[in-house]
Amino acid sequence: MKTPPARINYAVADRDLKYYIFDWDDNILHMPTSIHLERRHENGTWGPHSVSTAVFSVIRCDAENYRPPDGVWENAFRDFRDIDVDNENIFLRDTRTAVDRVVSGQDTAGPSFEKFRRTLVEGRLFAIVTARGHSPAVIREAVTYFINAVLTPEEHAVMLSNIRGYIACFDPQHIEATDEEVMRYYLDHNKYHGVMSPDFRRQMGQTPGASPNTEIGKQFAIKDFVEHIIALARQRGLSKPISVGFSDDDKGNVVAVEDYVRKELSMEFPGVKFVVYYTDDPKLPSGRKVVVRGQLSLDI
């Protein structure tokens, strides 16, 4: 039997240029990974105390009652680095657990779960920017698992047709690619930043042993993604307005990013519209929207 021709959605050439940056933990997924701390007891002694990322975002500035083991923050975040547990990368294991719990109805999704899902189905470019210390390859593999476990067969087909439409309109040399090659092409064009990873810190120009700062790291990663999408738009001859949405559940990160966009990014990239979403409030399923520049509604 002759293989039917692949579907190609040529209409993607006419759509707007919206791109998205997603934090991972408690924004897309509620991960089971724990942060290992010590907590002060009422009698003044200290004891082991592990917390979720959501709890840590609330207590992280409470140095009077919480501290890292042996005074070393790397010890607190040891499960947020690329280590193997039972011959499986811990991030991939925890992603699989979190995704499967959402798909089976055992747990709720993060506030940006559905927006990330729609971003994938539409074949739009995105960046994952997380305070974790995982390599781009590992984060990308987690995204691949999300795609395979969450998207329905119909959504897979729509995603591939949208990506093929982009290829047909802007990069036709790849028009004969197989479905696997199309997916690889798409994933190659996105960004995966674990800002505490050794590779990312070297990319930032940090010297070994320098004190890490997740807020500065996320700012660097956001600028990297903005430069990436602007370069692609220029290569493809696209002159439409560009908009970028950023979502994160951590107030400290959101405030730092909002300030960074206002004072620096909006000046360096005056043609780009930025919207920041703070997604820690369960009463606001899609997060609190802050339009930093422009009046664009990004429907995150």
Image (spheres, rainbow, N blue to C red):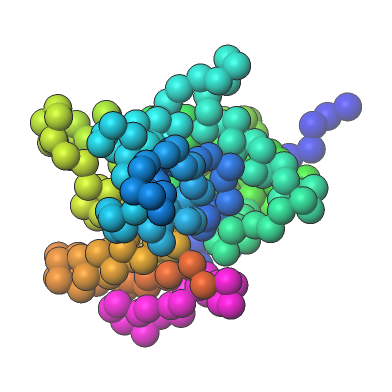
Foreground residue, 118 or 230?
A: 118
Q: Give the image location of residue 49, x and y in percent.
A: 46, 42
Q: Is residue 225 magenta?
A: no
Foreground residue, 282 or 218?
A: 282
Residue drawn at (37%, 78%), measured in percent from left and top?
290
Q: Give the image location of residue 157, x and y in percent.
A: 72, 47
Q: Give the image location of residue 209, x and y in percent.
A: 14, 29
Q: Give the image location of residue 181, x and y in percent.
A: 56, 30
Q: Main secondary structure of the magenta part?
A: loop
Residue drawn at (51%, 48%), measured in percent from left and top?
52
Quadrant in the picture for the N terminus = top right
Q: Is residue 191 above or below residue 113?
A: above
Q: Is residue 287 magenta?
A: yes
Residue drawn at (31%, 45%), measured in percent from left and top?
67
Q: Is residue 94 above or below residue 262?
A: above
Q: Does any portion of residue 60 appear in the rendered image?
A: no
Count of picture labels: 0
Name the residue at the front extreme.
Answer: 43
Q: Does any portion of residue 283 appear in the rendered image?
A: yes
Quarter holding residue 21:
bottom left
Q: Which residues are magenta?
A: 282-300
Foreground residue, 215 or 247?
A: 215
Foreground residue, 76 or 194?
A: 76
Q: Is residue 241 left or right of residue 219?
A: right
Quarter holding residue 250:
bottom left
Name the residue at the top extreme.
Answer: 87
Residue drawn at (50%, 61%), measured in percent from left and top?
13
Q: Is residue 190 left or right of residue 113?
A: left
Quarter holding residue 265:
bottom left
